[in-house]
Each structure stands twice: as C-alpha cells, then as structure tokens.
C-alpha cells in the first residue's frame, strides 16, 4: 500500500483538485469568444478547467510499476479505480458545491464534464495506450470548441461538453462513460500499445 501511494505520486491529483477549485472560483461564469468552423462563439472558460484533473490523473496512472504490481500481494488495480473515482467525484463535487459567482449552469456543466473527461481518459487509455489517453480529453475539448456547435445557441448533442449544465442526456452519457472507464482499467500490466497488445 505504501509503495502504491509513493509510486502514484498522490500529491499531484491533490494539487490538481485545489487548482481546479481555484480556477472554478476565479473564472466563475466568464466566457470567451473562441474560433469555430461556424464563426466565433462564446464558450464558458470553465470548459477547460477539468483538463487540470484529467492530466493529473493521467500522470498518476502512468507511473505504474508493472513488474512490481504484477507480483505484489496488494490490489494496486483496485486502488487505481478508487483514485479515478475519487478524482472524478471530488472534482465534480468541488465545482458544484463552490459558491461561485451566481452558481449558474456553467458550474453544473463543469462538474458533469469532469465525469465525462475522466471516463474518456480511462477508456482511450485502455484502447489506444497511455499517451493517447492523456491527450484524448484535451483533444475532445479543443475539437468541440471548433465543431461542436453550429453557432450561438445551436450546440450539437454529441458534443456533450458544450451542453448546458441541466442536460440530462449529457449527464447520463458522462456517468456511463465514467463507469465504463472504471470497468476497463487494467487489472494487471498496463496496455502500452494499441488494440490487443
């Protein structure tokens, strides 16, 4: 257990959670005009805050010691699941419970997006490897700012992260993707390659 705590560098997600909460408090409901294929559209700056958590979690999961963990008696893979659920849950709770600005739908969306992006990280990490998993949430957010809406107020449903905070379908997809990501976390040696490796 002590080896797992040291190897995973648990202060990294702790600092990520604090930074995430500070970003949410500072940014509040602010938005910025970002370029897209349909012209500049205003996107909430909180859209980018969950990336701090996904990168911190990716860093921790990437620090595995496969040979030591494969021969160890302790269940390191189980603790990885606890870590991923904790980061997603605490990140979602922090942004939703923070008394930020007006406490509007941007905070709810940021909490939901945290669940979605952590799930995306875990699924892509399992399918395409650790580095692709680390890049996937960043690529998704950037791609959705470019192609996720057809102008102001016309967001595509499949973009998920651009949908308003109260969108139930996006919440269901986010929780579902997180649960799938937790389920596909490796039980033994990590998948460093692509499909079937």
Image: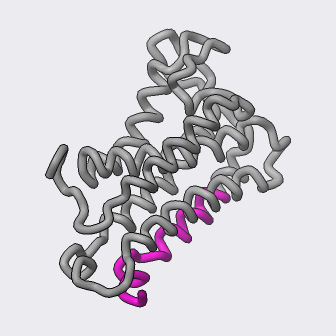
Task: Pick whichever, 56 or 173, lies toward us.
Answer: 173
The residue shown at (45%, 61%) is 56
Asked if the magenta segment contains residue 11, the reply would be yes
In the figure, 19 relative to 162: above or below?
below
Q: Position of residue 91 (x, y in %)?
A: 62, 57
Residue drawn at the location 47% of the way across and 26% of the way down: 144
Q: Position of residue 150 (x, y in %)?
A: 54, 10
Residues rendered magenta in the picture: 1-21
Residue at image location 78% in from the left, 55% down from the top:
97
Q: Is residue 114 above or below residue 187?
A: above
Q: Nearer the viewer, residue 177 or 10?
A: 177
Q: Is residue 165 above or below residue 17?
A: above
Drawn side of residue 155 relative to residue 37, left or right? right
Secondary structure mostly taken by the magenta-highlighted segment of the chain: helix
Placement of the N terminus among the 4 image quadrants: bottom left
Residue lying furthest bottom in this view? 2
Is 8 in the magenta?
yes
Picture coordinates of residue 59 (x, y %)? 37, 63
Q: Which quarter of the picture shows residue 188?
A: bottom left
């Amino acid at each position: 257990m002590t080896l797992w705590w040291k190897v995973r560098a648990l202060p990294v997600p702790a600092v990520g959670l604090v930074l995430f909460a500070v970003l949410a408090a500072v940014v509040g409901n602010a938005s910025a005009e970002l370029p897209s294929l349909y012209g500049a559209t205003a996107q909430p700056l909180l859209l980018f805050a969950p990336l701090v958590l996904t990168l911190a979690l990716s860093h921790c999961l990437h620090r595995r010691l496969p040979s030591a963990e494969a021969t160890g008696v302790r269940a390191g893979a189980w603790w990885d699941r606890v870590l991923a659920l904790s980061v997603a849950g605490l990140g979602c709770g922090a942004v939703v419970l923070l008394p930020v600005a007006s406490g509007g739908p941007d905070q709810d969306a940021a909490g939901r997006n945290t669940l979605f992006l952590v799930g995306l990280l875990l699924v892509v990490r399992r399918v395409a490897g650790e580095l692709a998993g680390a890049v996937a949430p960043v690529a998704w957010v950037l791609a959705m700012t470019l192609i996720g809406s057809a102008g102001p107020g016309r967001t595509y449903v499949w973009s998920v992260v651009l949908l308003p905070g109260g969108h139930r379908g996006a919440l269901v997809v986010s929780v579902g993707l997180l649960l799938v990501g937790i389920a596909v976390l490796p039980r033994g040696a990590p998948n460093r390659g692509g499909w079937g490796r």
